[in-house]
Amino acid sequence: MDLDAYVAEHGGKWRRLEELSRRGRLDAAEVDELVALYQRTTTHLSVLRSRAPDPALISQLSQLVLHARARLTGRPRASWAAVGRFFVAGFPAAVYRAWPWWCGVATGFSVLSLFLIWFVAHNPQTAAAFIGDEAAGELVDSGFAGYYTEFAAPTFAFHLWTHNAWVAAQCLAAGVLIVPVFYLLWQNALNVGVVGGVMVAYGRADVFFGLITPHGLLELTGVFVAAGVGLRVGWAWIAPPTQLTRGQAVARAGRDGVLVALGLVVLFAVSAVIEAFVTPAPVPIPLRIAVGATAWLAFLAYVLVLGRRATRSDPRRS
């Protein structure tokens, strides 16, 4: 193959393709010309790769083809409209579709945690076995309440945000294996049960529930959602819907998992702010709980109203 002759024959078309690819606005005829030149140049590139593998020329034409393809397909750009669609439809719909799963997780976790609190409170030797008598006394005297004021509020909020997001990410990522999700939930329920049981046993139930409730309602709901969506992904692998293959079912549930993971970043940011600034605030306990309950109920209403609306508008995803 005579490379110089080939370049001389087609070089004009390549230059014209480059010109159209860089031009700001094209009319209908120029768009048609761009498409035709793109197709021809793609063929030229394929010929050169197979018959005259000149690295410099192939690199030049590859870049030209990529630029032309980007001009034809358009470059994806972030937009406020896309962000709005995510928060108005994408995220709430993904959470709403998984509501049986995360509501089930929430119910099981709450029952188990309350049972552990009751059991530890009525069996002091159990708490001693878990953390020791000295540690239990310190926890009741200052340790539990001091946890919320040990660090500066902004630093504490950032730590809580990243920690909770990491726990949620583990639940979502491990959902396909199912068992790790239950292990993570058990660890958290055991922690709540032992600490709560010790506080109740020492007559400090008001301190425990007064400090954990304001942020715990929203924070734990985020964990429940992550665990429920993760388990939904695992179940899609075990028992896919009849109209979908196993791979399609997992892919669909996995896409919802990605939406939920992104949305929970915002939820955990809100819960972290509440825990760092509201929970330890020197105001009456009912007021702190009211702030947390308001944020929690607002999230549930957001998911119920917008999520149901988005799901009904796209019945194929329900």
Image (spheres, rainbow, N blue to C red):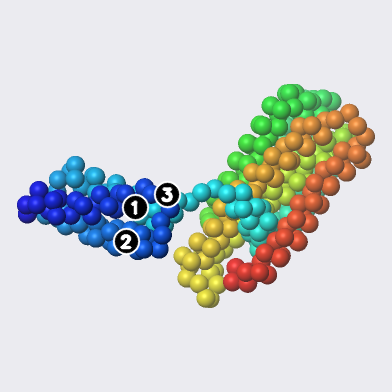
C-alpha gap between disc 1 and disc 3: 8 Å
Which one is nearer the viewer's eye here, 41 or 47?
Answer: 41
Residue pictured at 19% horizontal, 51% vertical = 11
Q: Amino acid at mark 1?
A: Leu
Say which label, 3 or 2, has the lower sequence index.
Answer: 3
Q: Amino acid at mark 3?
A: Gly
Q: Disc 2 on helix, strand or loop?
A: helix
Write down the quadrant of residue 199 in the picture. top right
Q: Write down the residue under mark 2.
A: 33
Write down the quadrant of residue 128 in the picture. top right
Q: Are marks 1 and 3 in contact (CB under 8 Å)?
A: no
- Report if residue 244 is visible in the image: yes
Q: Write down the residue under mark 3.
A: 24
In the picture, the quarter occupied by the C terminus is: bottom right
In the picture, the quarter occupied by the N terminus is: bottom left
Q: Is residue 70 left or right of residue 113?
A: left
Residue pictured at 48% horizontal, 51% vertical = 76
Write down the quadrant of residue 283 in the picture. top right
Q: Are marks 1 and 2 in contact (CB under 8 Å)?
A: yes
C-alpha gap between disc 1 and disc 2: 9 Å
- Quick one: label 1, few (<14), some, or many (20+) residues within 10 Å? some
Q: Position of residue 56 (x, y in %)?
A: 19, 42
Q: Position of residue 217 (x, y in %)?
A: 78, 46
Q: Write down the residue under mark 1.
A: 20
Q: Is residue 97 above or below residue 315?
A: above
Q: Amino acid at mark 2?
A: Glu
C-alpha gap between disc 3 and disc 2: 15 Å
Q: Disc 1 on helix, strand or loop?
A: helix
Which one is nearer the viewer's eye here, 309 or 46?
Answer: 46
Residue, far bottom: 242
Residue pictured at 62% horizontal, 49% vertical = 80
Q: Is residue 27 left or right of residue 268?
A: left
